[in-house]
Amino acid sequence: MTTDEAPTGGRGLAELVDDIARLEAIFARWDEAQRAAVAAYKRAIEALHAEALRRLVRACKAEPLALAALRAAVGDEVVYAVMRQLELLRPSLDERIAVALESVRPMLASHGGDVELVRVASPRIEVRFLGACDGCASSAVTFHAGIREAVQDACPEITEVVEVPGAGGPPASRDALVSPFALVQRRPWRHACELAELGDGTVRALAIDSCRVLLARRGDAVSCFMNSCAHLGLPLDDGSLEAGVLTCRHHGFRYDLSTGECLTAPAVALETLPVRVVAGRIEVRLAS
């Protein structure tokens, strides 16, 4: 079952998640007191639902047939997503792989590339580079330093991460149980500004739905970060920029804007957001 399909008489997961995303976009425009009230209401509803489902699970565990039926029901994408959101299930292997790949996509996108999951056959997965990363002379370095490390950190049971050729072949060989609530890629792309409005070699601070972001451009490559220094969370847009390195004016922390890496304290980094350029428009996916 894909995220666009629905059981007879029901709504698909993608449609339900889109409804939530539209409401979240409205809430983001409210003042802090209103957002806090909505958040408290949400926590109360989730606590009620979580307790009800815990009791249901406990009851099913006492009956072998009921337990088998419950395990089968978790295979439904909507059931799985809700139980994951309420932390009643551990994340599936598919979900952990998806989160790991998503963590490296902003870095790849800043160079005009992407990565695609081709096949999962634990303890091995196969991935394919897309866009500018496909056939790039440095793709092997990118693969070993980024993708392999991210996947194996999130999924220790995966012992082989194999790059396959870029041309042809279908994506992922099986349906994946991935919680939409846990993944950034389920959120819509939001218009930030026109590419022409961001000068080459410059940065620009913007607020998108009350989210403060920082755009950086190097030629046709654009990066996007939360406009928040990894040191004390102070804004970065008034820092000094030289040769692609932004220095926070408050305490001198230096950041490589091609990756978000902190050159002053390598243990920290800027929070990177997915960004793309479509028909001259810069679009960003917000983290929340």
Image (spheres, rainbow, N blue to C red):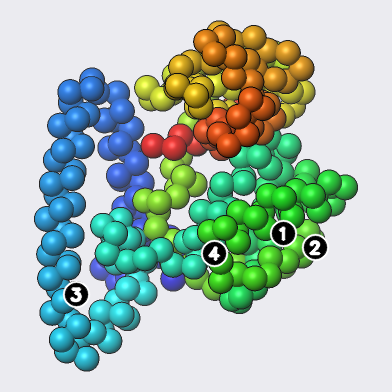
Residue designated by label 4: 155
The amino acid at mark 3 is Val
Q: Are marks 1 and 3 in contact (CB under 8 Å)?
A: no
The residue that mark 3 highlights is 57
SS at circle 2: loop
Q: Which SS class for mark 1?
A: strand
- Please identify the quarter of the rendering in which residue 163 is found: bottom right
Q: CA distance from mark 2 to mark 4?
A: 23 Å
Mark 1 or mark 3: name the one nearer the start of the chain: 3
In terms of sequence position, does the residue under pointer 2 or pointer 1 come before the other? 1
Image marks 1 and 4: residues in contact by CB distance under 8 Å: no
Report the Cα–Cα distance between label 1 and label 3. 39 Å
Task: Please rate how many residues cluster around mark 1, counting C-alpha atoms within 10 Å: few if below 14, some from 14 to 19, many from 20.
Answer: many
Residue that appears at 26% across and 68% down: 9
Which amino acid is tagged 2? Pro
Residue positioned 16% across, 76% down in the render: 58
Q: Which residue is mark 2?
A: 165
- Mark 2 or 3: the one toward you: 3
**Residue closer to the observer: 242 or 109:** 242
Task: Please state the horizontal and vertical placement of residue 271, each as a whole percent of the image.
Answer: 52, 33
* 2 and 1 marks in contact (CB < 8 Å): yes
